[in-house]
Every structure is written in structure tokens, then in C-alpha cells.
């Protein structure tokens, strides 16, 4: 079966636009023309700041590292990445899906929080992020109301995790608990989507209940960690590992990896991500017991698992959200390979050789830049293929 | 060929409609929307076509794209460049029973 059938141009699509749901930003006229590119630019700036800050922490000095905002970004790397950048991206995705104008308050708020971090107002940023995540809970209540099923409920639970993480960051709790909630938001968002897809496969009884139990542990462990960091961390690591095993065993990627083109590429991204999720789970538990592996715990999870999902899903989500048609090409495997190989390099030298780790991290970032280039190439390729 | 959705319209157009809809593919699973069972009903009356379909998830941002593809494919396939109205519904909810035999084989049922 060929996924390329969707990648065609509609030339006969006149007079119907008004009947169509407005894509990606349901505002009209001058407002939309102004807000859309502004929001896109803000989200991109959040990612750029988050990456700059992350690299700076490892001693990679980019040409603009001397600026004040780069310093702020280094201090707020995690907050820029999850409750700002990812909350904005996932907020846009959800708002597009449910087509409610007020839902766009989530990405606008999350991106504004990122901006506040970059200009050195962390306290204001945390409050704005908290407000955005409160609205995000409301958005997901609406998703559950429309489709009262387990995967919708998980999306709501993921929003509550984001809210809990933002509360914990304001309350000055253990940073591990804040990070635990934030990563639980991402892991649960991904798990909800994967659970929904498993409905295409024959599902043995108990499989869904097992996932729900694992995710309950994932959300509950950071709460334990607020008071008891050691058991909280071990439970959290165990939940991550079990989630990886569940996904490896039951995800449709095991089937779709035998397909071709985009479907196979997505499956490869998913399966590679699950391997990092498992490794990060073990490392998370180990770190909480005072052993080494904190970089693997945080960045095996953030880069190996979450960004691998991003690389896999962007070729599908971007066309849907930004209305840019992409023609999939094998070049997409290049950033994927660079990302995963540079992660192996990064964690293999940790923590002995800081220079090597910085070099490997530089390649982590290069992988993301390469990916952006592949997206541009795919958009151009689509135009060439559909030139009439 | 098994009947995958309710059809109301000129019998000679039925195959054309089915073939057009089978060109719309869910990119993640590499299966078309007819095989996945997302199409509930198609009505062709004169130069107006009405489609009722669903998605597996209400939180899926790809929905608009699939709806647009359905409109494109039907307009291209049917004579007279008809107006195509697609209604996205959540009742009845999609269930795995709606998968076609070939989709089940691919998914290892």
C-alpha cells in the first residue's frame, strides 16, 4: 500500500473553502495574518532558545552565546523545552483538532512563557505557563466530552501532568519532581496517541488496563518524589521502562515497519525512540539511587524518545497544521540516523570526557537542523512533483 | 467486493466513488480510509455529493487534511466536477469491526 496517494494537489478546490473548517488558526482577516506568523516565529524562537541554552550548559559556545538571552536560556533550558516549546506545539496540534478559537490561548501562552524566560523573567514565565496549562486542561476536557474514550482521558491526564509540573516549578519543589511531571506530560501524550492506534490491531484483554496502570505510576511517582525523592525516582524509572516494554510489545509500529515510505519511516522513528525510553527509565532509577547516568535519564528521554517521535510525526502533522504539502523522501532517514548515533556517542563518553560530550551534543542539534532542511526539501519536492 | 459504506446514488458511479475514496490514505498506517472503515455513507444526487465519515480520534489534527483529500478525489473522479460536502461525525463511534479483511491481515488479526 502506498502512502503517497495523499500527497497530491487539489486543483479543483474552488468555492468550497468557506464550507471547510479553517485550518490551523481559526481567525479571519488581518488578525490571522498577523497572529499566525507571529505564533510560528515565537514557537521557533522557543526551540532555538532551548537548544542554545542546552548546548551552552554543555560548554558549546555558539556565536550568539554572549548575549543576555543565551544566559537566561541556559538557566531555563528545561522550562523552555517542555512547558514552553512542547506545550505550544502540542497546544497548536490540539487546537487545530478541536477547532476552538480559545484553545489557541494555550500555544500563545506557552510561547509567551518561553519569551519571558528568554528575557530573564523566570517567575513571570512560570505564572504564564501555569495559566496556559490550566486552559490546556479545559481544552482536553472538551476532547473527552466529544470522544469519551480511554485515549481521550489520557490526553486530559497528560494536561494535568503539565499543570502539576508547572505548579511544582513555582512551588520550589524538588527539580526532579518538576521534570518528572513535565516528561509525564509528553510521555502520556505520546502513549495516548499510540493507544488509539493499537485499536487497529487485535488487542488482548488487559492490554489497555496494563498501560493505564503504568501511566498512573508515571504520573504518581513525581508526586511521591516531592516528598521522597528516592522511591519517587525509582518508581518513575520503572514506569518509563514498563512503558517502553508495553510500546515495544503492542504498538502498531511493529506492523507498519513492514510497510513502505512514510509509514515505515515513522515506525523506525517510534521503535528507535522506545529503545531510548527503556534506557532512560533504567538511568532515571539509577540516578535517583545516586548512581551515574543523569544525562541519559533526561536526554535519552527528551532527545532519544521525544524528539524521535517529533521526527517521525512532523512529516504528517506539519502538512495538517501548517498547510504545507510535503513529498516524503528517504533523506528523512539522515537526521534520524545522525540523532540516534550522536546520542549513542554522547552517552558512551559520559561523564568522563566533557569535550567529547559537547561535540556529540553539537551533533544532536545538527540532526535537528538537518531535519528542518529535509522538511524544506520535501516541500520543494512536492511542488516539483505536482507542477503541471 | 464487500460493501464498505452505505451508498445512495446512481449504481454506475459506485465503483468510481469507491476507487476515488481508496486513494485517500492515512499516512501513518499506509491504509486507505475505505479499508480502515472511516467512511460511513456517500450520497450522490445530481451534481452534489455528500459524505459522512469519522476519524479514529477526536484529537487528530490530520482530520482536515483527509477531509480535503476526500473532496479533491471525488471532484476529480466524478463527472461534472460536483460539489462535495463532507460531514465528520462521532456517532456511531469507529470500532475495529469496521476494518476490511485486507486491513486486518496487514495488522495481524
Image (cartoon, rainbow, N blue to C red):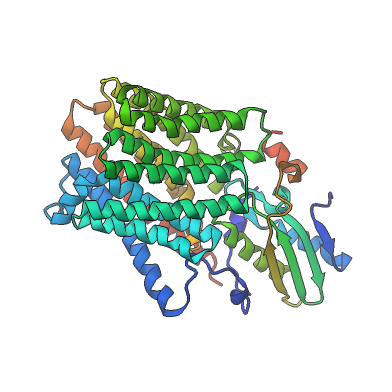
Identify the residue at horizontal 79%, vertical 52% (top origin).
B4
Extreme-right residue of the structure: B11
The C terminus of chain A: image quadrant: bottom right
Identify the residue at horizontal 80%, vertical 69% (top origin).
B44
Instruction: Residue B2 in the image: state x and y as whole percent.
Output: 84, 49
Residue A275 shows in this picture: no
Q: Looking at the picture, tell me which residue is in the foreground, A64 or A198.
A: A198
Identify the residue at horizontal 57%, vertical 43% (top origin).
A151
Identify the residue at horizontal 32%, vertical 47% (top origin).
A81
Total number of numbered labels?
0
Asked if A305 appears above or below A382 in the picture, the reply is: above
Residue B50 shows in this picture: yes
Instruction: Residue A34 in the image: state x and y as whole percent.
Output: 37, 74
Instruction: Residue A238 in the image: state x and y as whole percent.
Output: 42, 24
Q: Looking at the picture, tell me which residue is in the foreground, B58 or A4.
A: B58
Q: Looking at the picture, tell me which residue is in the foreground, B90 or A102.
A: A102
Amino acid at each position: 500500500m502506498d502512502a503517497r496517494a495523499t500527497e497530491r494537489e487539489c486543483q479543483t478546490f474552488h468555492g468550497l473553502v468557506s464550507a471547510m473548517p479553517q485550518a490551523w488558526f481559526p481567525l479571519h482577516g488581518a488578525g490571522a495574518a498577523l497572529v499566525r506568523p507571529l505564533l510560528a516565529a515565537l514557537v521557533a524562537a522557543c526551540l532555538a532558545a532551548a537548544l542554545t541554552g542546552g548546548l551552552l550548559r554543555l560548554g558549546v559556545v555558539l556565536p550568539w552565546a554572549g548575549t543576555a538571552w543565551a544566559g537566561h536560556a541556559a538557566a531555563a533550558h528545561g522550562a523552555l523545552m517542555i512547558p514552553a516549546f512542547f506545550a505550544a506545539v502540542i497546544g497548536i496540534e490540539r487546537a487545530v483538532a478541536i477547532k476552538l478559537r480559545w484553545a489557541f490561548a494555550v500555544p500563545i501562552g506557552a510561547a509567551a512563557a518561553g519569551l519571558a524566560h528568554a528575557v530573564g523573567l523566570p517567575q513571570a514565565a512560570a505564572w504564564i505557563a501555569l495559566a496556559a496549562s490550566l486552559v490546556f486542561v479545559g481544552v482536553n476536557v472538551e476532547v473527552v466530552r466529544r470522544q469519551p474514550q480511554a485515549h481521550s482521558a489520557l490526553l486530559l491526564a497528560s494536561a494535568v501532568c503539565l499543570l502539576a509540573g508547572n505548579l511544582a516549578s513555582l512551588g520550589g519543589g524538588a527539580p526532579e519532581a518538576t521534570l518528572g511531571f513535565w516528561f509525564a506530560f509528553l510521555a502520556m501524550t505520546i502513549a495516548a496517541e499510540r493507544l488509539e492506534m493499537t485499536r487497529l490491531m487485535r488487542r488482548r484483554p488487559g492490554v489497555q488496563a496494563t498501560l493505564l496502570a503504568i501511566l498512573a505510576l508515571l504520573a504518581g511517582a513525581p508526586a511521591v518524589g516531592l516528598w521522597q525523592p528516592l522511591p519517587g525516582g525509582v518508581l518513575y524509572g520503572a514506569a518509563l521502562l514498563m512503558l517502553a516494554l508495553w510500546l515495544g510489545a503492542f504498538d502498531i509500529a511493529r506492523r507498519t515497519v513492514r510497510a513502505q515510505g512514510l509509514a515505515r519511516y515513522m515506525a523506525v522513528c517510534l521503535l528507535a525512540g522506545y529503545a531510548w525510553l527503556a534506557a532512560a527509565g533504567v538511568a532515571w532509577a539509577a540516578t535517583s539511587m545516586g548512581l551515574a547516568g543523569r544525562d541519559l535519564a533526561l536526554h535519552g528521554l527528551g532527545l532519544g524518545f521525544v524528539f524521535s517521535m517529533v521526527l517521525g510525526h512532523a512529516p504528517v502533522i506539519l502538512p495538517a497544521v501548517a498547510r504545507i504539502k510535503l513529498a516524503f523522501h528517504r533523506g528523512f532517514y539522515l537526521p534520524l540516523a545522525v540523532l540516534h548515533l550522536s546520542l549513542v556517542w554522547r552517552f558512551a563518553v559520559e561523564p568522563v570526557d566533557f569535550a567529547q560530550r559537547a561535540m556529540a551534543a553539537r551533533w544532536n542539534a545538527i540532526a535537528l537542523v538537518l531535519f528542518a532542511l529535509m522538511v524544506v526539501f520535501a516541500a520543494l519536492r512536492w511542488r516539483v512533483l505536482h507542477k503541471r | 467486493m464487500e460493501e464498505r459504506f452505505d451508498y445512495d446514488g446512481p449504481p454506475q458511479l459506485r465503483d468510481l466513488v469507491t476507487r476515488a475514496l481508496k486513494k485517500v490514505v492515512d499516512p501513518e498506517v499506509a491504509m486507505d480510509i475505505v479499508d480502515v472503515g472511516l467512511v460511513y455513507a456517500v450520497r450522490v444526487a445530481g451534481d452534489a455529493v455528500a459524505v459522512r465519515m469519522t476519524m479514529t480520534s477526536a484529537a487528530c489534527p490530520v482530520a482536515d487534511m483527509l477531509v480535503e483529500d476526500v473532496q479533491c478525489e471525488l471532484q476529480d473522479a466524478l463527472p461534472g466536477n460536483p460539489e462535495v460536502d463532507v460531514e465528520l461525525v462521532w456517532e456511531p463511534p469507529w470500532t475495529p469491526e469496521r476494518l476490511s479483511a485486507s486491513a486486518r491481515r496487514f495488522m495481524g488479526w
